[in-house]
Image (spheres, rainbow, N blue to C red):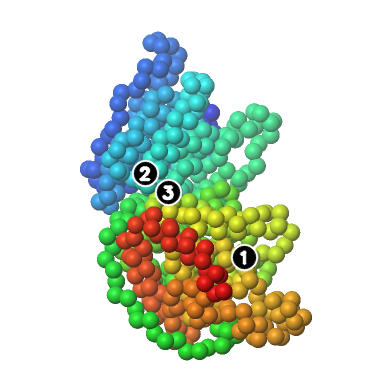
Amino acid sequence: MNERDGGGERATTRPRRPGARDLLELVVDPGSWIGWDQPPLPVAAPGSAYAAELDGAARRAGTDEAVITGQARIRGRRVAVIAGEFAFLAGSIGATAAERIVSAFERARREGLPMVAAPASGGTRMQEGTPAFVDMVKISAAVAAFKADGLPYLVYLRHPTTGGVFASWGSLGHVTVAEPGALVGFLGPRVYQALYGHPFPDGVQTAENLHARGLIDAVLPVEGLADIAARTLNLLSAPREEHPEVFELPREPLPDVPAWESIVRSRRPQRPSVRALLKLGATDVVPLHGTNQGEYDPALMLALARFGGAACVVLGQNRRGQSVERPLTPSGLRAARRGMRLAADLKLPLVSVIDTAGAALSREAEEGGLAGEIARCLAELVMLEAPTICVLLGEGTGGGALALMPADKVICAQHSWLSPLPPEGAAAILHRDPARAPELAAAQGVRSSDLLAAGIVDRVVPEYPDAADEPAEFCARMSHVLQYELARLLGMDPSRRLRDRLARYRTLSVARV
């Protein structure tokens, strides 16, 4: 298959990819498709070369334009669908295709339907010139209005997706996945070679490379699209209110464990991570990947998940993705901020999980804007309209930990702790002796019982005697508490919830004076 009509596709030996109608047969429930499309707009003069091109394209593609739109069911859930047809003039977007896309978003918005879009396109239709190019603005506006209503938008990037399509509705999904081996990029390789006289570098504009760079969330074959769409939409379309309250776990008295003992236990390699909490305590987990803007940090995990009846966005520091050589970076905090935006867009609760030995202290971190990212996380979290819960799960060192802490409710594992520096570092500053870390940890009030007494945390989840020795049981207890607190927060008036959160942090240290 060769590049045509500016479509950006190289000659390739890849197997034939499914067209728009083939895609529908593979993904939507049988017999559920209802088309929404009106006849094409009169964009070509009768008898013109362009009119002949359109007629020939329709015969070859079996569709009357480069996109088809409509509604269907995926695993029983009613959704709106936009499917690109590359065989129609390389899937290029002219006036008719743009109008269909905009109309589909508008109708889906009116009917409260989630949207699944599967583009395959070389971008703007050159035959229609600048007006077609500018139509990408109205498409992006329709997507933005749709998302402003809190409706879910899932994108499946097919081979190839380039140009203005990738730079508009192809890059605005809440969740974005791509076809294996798909060519995905802004500038088509043929155009690049024509402009610069040499080929575009191999391996850059591929689905796999975009995933590695944190631009898309997953790479999966079309046969897996129905499953990921159903799981994602089940989560994103879950009711936001009227969750039944679960039975509250009793607040048990906690043993008086020295701060240093908790710190040592929090550093055990076997201690449950955020991944363990999701695996053992949540359901319907859909992992996301990176910032969606070209960065990925394994120290920060992002996912959609359900605790009990409540769907939420989870962003958590992953202890398995951190080390002395590879600590939490500014990219990780930018991924966290993507999670905050998702919670705001989708009107979902946000659960943040703290478990870090500290953010990177390096030239790269300074030049990457670490301090600014901490500040922006603090400001966005404290003002987020969505319900928020923070879980102190393990180590809680420095600004990298604090960045994820502001919340309506803060839950702390018994052997978790929070400190401006590792106790060894603080002891070196104050006493010039890291060996005095246990003494300083006790004096600074870093342990869970001290944080509870100071009003920094609201609840401590016990460990019997150590979460590392009972991971499944501990994660079940933590999940139970999350279910309870999420149900309570979802039942609150949003304006009161935000007022209470702001008042909490406004008076926190004053209450201790």
Check if mark 2's residue and mark 1's residue have beta carbons within 8 Å: no
Q: Residue furthest left?
A: 31
Question: What residue is at 27 percent from the left and 43 percent from the top?
Answer: 72
Secondary structure at numbered mark 3: helix
The 10 Å Cα crowd at callout 3, few under 14, some 14 to 19, many 20 or more, is some
The 10 Å Cα crowd at callout 1, few under 14, some 14 to 19, many 20 or more, is many
For marks 2 and 1, the one nearer the N-term is 2
Q: Position of residue 287 (x, y in %)?
A: 45, 59
Callout 2 amino acid: Asp
> What residue sits right under mark 2 in the picture?
149
Callout 3 amino acid: Asp
Foreground residue, 499 or 217? 499
Image quarter where the C terminus lies is bottom right
Foreground residue, 423 or 77? 423
Q: Tell me where residue 83 sits by quadrant.
A: top left
Question: What residue is at 37 percent from the left and 68 percent from the top?
Answer: 485
Secondary structure at numbered mark 1: helix
> What residue sits right under mark 1 in the picture?
399
